[in-house]
């Protein structure tokens, strides 16, 4: 009954906090965004590595621009590439957009590499600033030194034999990835009327082009110095949307810069692999602490929230489930070492599984989506330190003298407190025990305990207390 009342009282104390959080969440969702002027030109930015957060921001931005009857959307691009899944999600949104989308690689020194090249090909109009480049669109999973080098022609070969085809990846999986990427970018090139042959070279050979070369080879549609120059060149240009030709009329249209909102920024934080990794560990440790000390509440709540956030992040990140399983197994073994000490066997195995699983947790070669090695080492060291602390406590506990139970009475002294029907009763450890001795005992005799068994003590007489 007492436990039930305490749980009920804890629930009523937490209820106002839960309602407050729910109200704040509803307020954030219900906050009306400033209504942009109808018929404007929306400006979106793709900066840095393409991942779930900025793909969500760009996709929702294009959809919001369509809902506000925007004349066009300009995506300013400067990216080294990103995740294939995020790229394809964004391209699906671009292809379905009823609003013309202009991809613009800017400012000078920017690039649209890897996934950025695909996105530029998917836009209705592709533009670049001077001193920018695009290309290197080989899938990251196979862009490694393991690819076979092109065969060099020998000195006596005829000239026509010296132009060998692009080298093919060695394994069947690599060939599938390359052929799939080639077919995908060629489809985009055919849809937008751009150079499909060079697009295939960008995938198979990792080719890149400067802005002037891209314009010359019909990879892009125009080169613009800045936004004003871009808008001037776009005026009157024809684009095809849903099979219909539309003429761009952007003169005098207000420029509306659409920044990432709190949702995109929050998603960017929790989908950082290092943050998601730390959230997962905090969640697991919080739940372990709650289960080992039930009734505290706070570790369990924090742990559950962290676990849910980490699972959401892992759902949109390229996670290796083998790595995730090894991390969880490693933590479980280290916890098992604390509850069932095996003198380091379980703990050491758990630590090895934890480190290996953490290294292979992210199933991608993109550096931006790898867990930083210092983070792995720091958390592994903290877990190892906790494990050593627990093992030290167990070792000391096993070598401490016994301070309770019958065996703890051996060697202690006591006094005969009374005789009952000729049986001496000795007070030891605050209790009266029946005592047997080779010598007759009298009230007040001081004795030393030699052995303890059942409810009787074996004692020896020392001297009589005066």
Image (tube, rainbow, N blue to C red):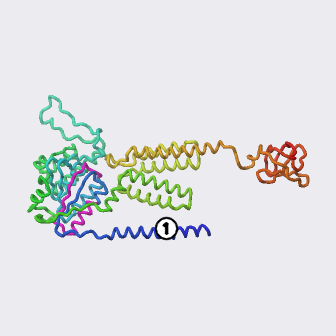
Question: Residue 105: image x %, image y %?
Answer: 18, 52
Question: Residue 79: image x %, image y %?
Answer: 24, 50
Magenta stretch encompasses residue 72: yes
Question: Between residues 91 and 71, which one lies in front from this camera angle?
Answer: 71
Question: Between residues 125 and 422, which one lies in front from this camera angle?
Answer: 422
* Residue beneath the point at 39% across and 70% down: 23
Magenta stretch encompasses residue 108: no
Q: Quadrant of residue 46?
A: bottom left
Q: Is residue 399 left or right of residue 412?
A: left
Residue at the outermost top position: 155
Where is 28 relative to 207, above or below?
Answer: below
Q: Is residue 301 left or right of residue 414?
A: left
Question: Between residues 201 and 353, which one lies in front from this camera angle?
Answer: 353
- Label 1: how many residues lie within 10 Å, few (<14), some (14-19) or many (20+)? few
Question: Residue 255: image x %, image y %?
Answer: 17, 63
- The residue segment tinted magenta is 57-83
At mark 1, the secondary structure is helix
Residue at the outermost front position: 466
* Residue beneath the point at 48% across and 46% down: 382
Residue identifier under label 1 = 14
């Amino acid at each position: 009954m007492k436990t039930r009342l305490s749980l009920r009282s804890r629930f009523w104390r937490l209820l106002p906090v839960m309602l407050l959080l729910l109200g704040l969440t509803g307020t954030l969702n219900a906050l009306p965004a400033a209504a942009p002027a109808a018929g404007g030109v929306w400006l979106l930015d793709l900066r840095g590595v393409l991942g779930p957060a900025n793909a969500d921001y760009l996709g929702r931005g294009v959809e919001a621009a369509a809902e506000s009857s925007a004349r066009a959307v300009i995506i300013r691009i400067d990216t080294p590439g990103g995740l294939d899944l995020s790229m394809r999600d964004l391209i699906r949104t671009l292809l379905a957009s009823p609003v013309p989308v202009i991809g613009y690689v800017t400012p000078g020194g920017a690039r649209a590499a890897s996934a950025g090249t695909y996105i530029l090909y998917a836009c209705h109009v592709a533009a670049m600033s001077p001193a920018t480049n695009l290309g290197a669109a080989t899938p990251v999973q196979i862009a490694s030194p393991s690819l076979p080098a092109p065969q060099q022609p020998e000195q006596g070969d005829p000239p026509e034999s010296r132009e060998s085809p692009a080298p093919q990846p060695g394994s069947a999986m690599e060939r599938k990835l390359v052929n799939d990427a080639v077919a995908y970018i060629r489809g985009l090139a055919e849809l937008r009327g751009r150079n499909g042959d060079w697009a295939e070279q960008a995938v198979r050979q990792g080719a890149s082009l400067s802005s002037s070369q891209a314009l010359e080879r019909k990879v892009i549609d125009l080169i613009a110095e800045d936004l004003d120059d871009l808008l001037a060149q776009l005026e009157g240009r024809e684009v095809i949307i849903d099979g219909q030709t539309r003429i761009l009329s952007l003169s005098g249209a207000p420029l509306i810069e659409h920044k990432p909102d709190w949702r995109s920024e929050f998603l960017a934080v929790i989908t950082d692999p290092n943050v998601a990794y730390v959230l997962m560990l905090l969640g697991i440790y919080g739940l372990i602490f709650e289960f080992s000390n039930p009734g505290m509440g706070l570790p369990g709540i924090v742990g559950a929230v962290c676990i849910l956030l980490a699972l959401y992040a892992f759902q949109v990140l390229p996670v290796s489930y083998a790595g995730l399983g090894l991390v969880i197994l490693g933590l479980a073994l280290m916890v098992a070492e604390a509850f069932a000490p095996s003198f380091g066997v379980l703990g050491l195995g758990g630590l090895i599984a934890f480190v290996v699983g953490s290294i292979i947790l992210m199933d991608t070669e993109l550096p931006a989506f790898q867990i930083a090695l210092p983070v792995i080492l720091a958390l592994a060291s903290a877990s190892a330190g906790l494990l050593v602390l627990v093992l030290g406590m167990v070792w000391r506990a096993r070598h401490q003298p016994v301070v309770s139970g019958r065996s703890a009475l051996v060697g202690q002294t006591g006094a005969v407190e009374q005789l009952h029907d000729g049986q001496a009763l000795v007070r030891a450890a605050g209790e009266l025990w029946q005592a047997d001795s080779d010598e007759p005992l009298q009230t007040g005799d001081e004795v030393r305990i030699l052995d303890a068994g059942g409810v009787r003590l074996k004692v020896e007489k020392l001297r009589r207390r005066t």
